[in-house]
Image (spheres, rainbow, N blue to C red):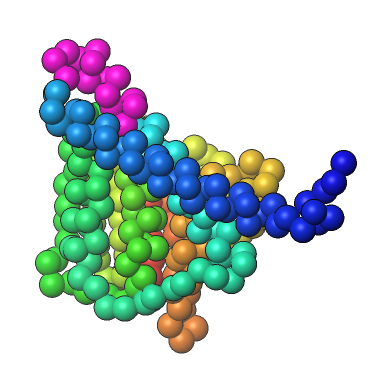
Amino acid sequence: MIDGNESGIDFSLVLASSVHDMKNSVGMLLASLESVIEDTPPTSEVQARRFSTLHYEASRINSELIQLLTIYRMQNDVLPVHIDEHYIIDIFDDQIARNHMLTETKGVTITLDCDSDLHWYFDHDLIGSVIHNIIVNCVRYTHSSILIQARIENDLLCITIADDGSGYPANMLNRTAGQIDEADVRNGGTHLGLYFAEKIAGFHKQNNRIGYIDMSNGDPLGGGVFKLFLP
């Protein structure tokens, strides 16, 4: 038997390349599915649930493939981070539009609470991926409503995504902030999305302040509350 080192094959590179191809294929699948739903809207609740399940699962796979590829690039120091000034409302609008079909087929309402003039410095694509992942997760667990909000708290940008579901489980709430490590992910002790969000937040630094995430249950909608803080 010839292992990867002896044959000169970098298996991690092959895997990353395959993940990239799968991500693109699932993206095309999602676009085709949205066209089908738009051309032939569901005519019954059963059909609407099937469309919703198809769209949710495809979105979730697409998000996880993007996270895997991003984490691979992080570990190989080839992840580009472009921090620039952006209007917060623009990134919210992008992600709401991106998930419009998913929320519509699921019957979920998104309420946006953000000053249209609020702007901040961050990597648009990376933070967009974090928001997208949280929205997809909320759509699965919420009953009917999601709130997306942005405020300035203690000179940090605070992005809040809350839902009216049953909230985050205790093992996720009891973790210590900034203490999710790669061993946890390998052992299945935490969700990949949480690890991804914490790493992306940590790329945003100013002086001695570093971005971080926080989770709780309760107000404003009574369910899970995800907060992303950026300096």
Which one is nearer the viewer's eye here, 105 or 88?
105
User: Image point 30% across, 19% down: which residue?
Assistant: 50
Our reading of the magenta stretch's main secondary structure is helix
User: Image point 47% across, 64% down: which residue?
Assistant: 200
Answer above or below: position of 19 versus 155.
Answer: above
Answer above or below: position of 92 versus 40.
Answer: below
User: Image point 27% across, 71% down: which residue?
Assistant: 152
Answer left or right for 45 relative to 188.
left
User: Which quarter shows the C terminus?
Assistant: bottom left
**Is 90 within the magenta?**
no
Measured from the top left, where is residue 121 in percent x and y? 31, 77
Which one is nearer the viewer's eye here, 73 or 130?
73
Residue 224 at least partly seen? no
Q: How many marks?
A: 0
Measured from the top left, where is residue 29 in percent x and y? 34, 36
User: Which quarter shows the N terminus?
Assistant: top right
User: Image point 73% across, 55% down: which residue?
Assistant: 9
Answer left or right for 71 relative to 105.
right
Q: Residue furthest right?
A: 1
Residue 130 at least partly seen? yes
**Is 51 within the magenta?**
yes
Measured from the top left, where is residue 114 in percent x and y? 17, 61
Q: Residue furthest front?
A: 7
Answer left or right for 177 relative to 183.
left
Where residue 127 sits, quadrant-wise, is: bottom left
Answer left or right for 115 relative to 205.
left
Q: Which residues are magenta?
A: 42-55
Which one is nearer the viewer's eye here, 72 or 16?
16
Measured from the top left, where is residue 76 in percent x and y? 62, 67
